[in-house]
Image (spheres, rainbow, N blue to C red):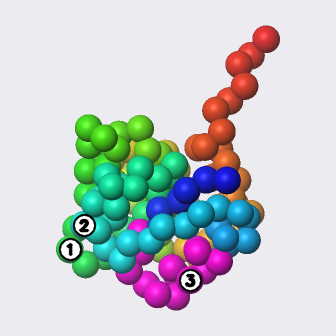
Amino acid sequence: MARVLVVDDSPVEMQKLVGCLSRHGHKVLTARNGVDGVEMAQRAQPDVVLMDIVMPGINGFKATREIKRGETTSHIPVIIVSSKSEASDESWGRRQGAAGYIHKPFDEQRLINELNRVLLPEAPSP
């Protein structure tokens, strides 16, 4: 399965995300803030990043932008998982390079579907 980097400062949310991903066979890496998330993405080269928005230091929007503009990380899809649920938040997240946006509290199946969507290339049309 995939190597997933979860970036979230909430121990409760981290536990929920790690549990969900582990149940579905994914290897999970974690970071507790945006700075550590960017550094971990550079170092570990995960298959995908799940990024919270509201965190100390640099927020998830800036961390997403840094990952997507990074020379060694631009290929890594980022899915934002946040309690910020305004349409403007989702739009801004996508403008920073996010491949997806999921609202907290997240639905486990929706999270897995979104993860699969960004990880599995679409089959070519006949």
Check disc 3 and report its element: helix, strand or loop: helix
Quarter the C terminus occupies: top right
Given the current orientation, which residue lies at the most extreme bottom position? 12
Please state the horizontal and vertical placement of residue 77, each as a whole percent of the image.
47, 46
Check disc 2 and report its element: helix, strand or loop: helix
User: Which of the marked residues, 2 or 3, is nearer the chain's N terminus?
Assistant: 3
Q: Name the image quarter holding residue 3.
A: bottom right
Q: Nearer the viewer, residue 38 or 1?
A: 1
Query: The residue under label 3 is which amino acid type?
Result: Gln
Magenta region, main secondary structure: helix
The residue positioned 40% from the left and 56% from the top of the image is 44
CA distance separating discs 1 and 2: 7 Å
Please state the horizontal and vertical placement of residue 110, each as a whole percent of the image.
69, 60
- Mark 1 neighbour density, 10 Å: few (under 14) some (14–19) many (20 or more): few
Left or right? Give the position of 46 relative to 67: right
The residue positioned 64% from the left and 61% from the top of the image is 26
CA distance separating discs 1 and 3: 21 Å
Q: Which residue in the protein does label 3 denote?
A: 15
Q: Are marks 1 and 2 in contact (CB under 8 Å)?
A: yes
Query: The residue under label 1 is which amino acid type?
Result: Gly
Q: Which residue in the protein does label 1 denote?
A: 57
- Mark 1 vs mark 3: give the one in front: 3
CA distance separating discs 2 and 3: 20 Å
Q: In the rendered structure, which segment of residues is drawn in magenta?
A: 7-19
Q: Which residue in the protein does label 2 denote?
A: 35
Residue 33 highlighted magenta (yes or no): no
Left or right? Give the position of 108 relative to 46: right
Please state the horizontal and vertical placement of residue 66, each as a whole percent of the image.
26, 50
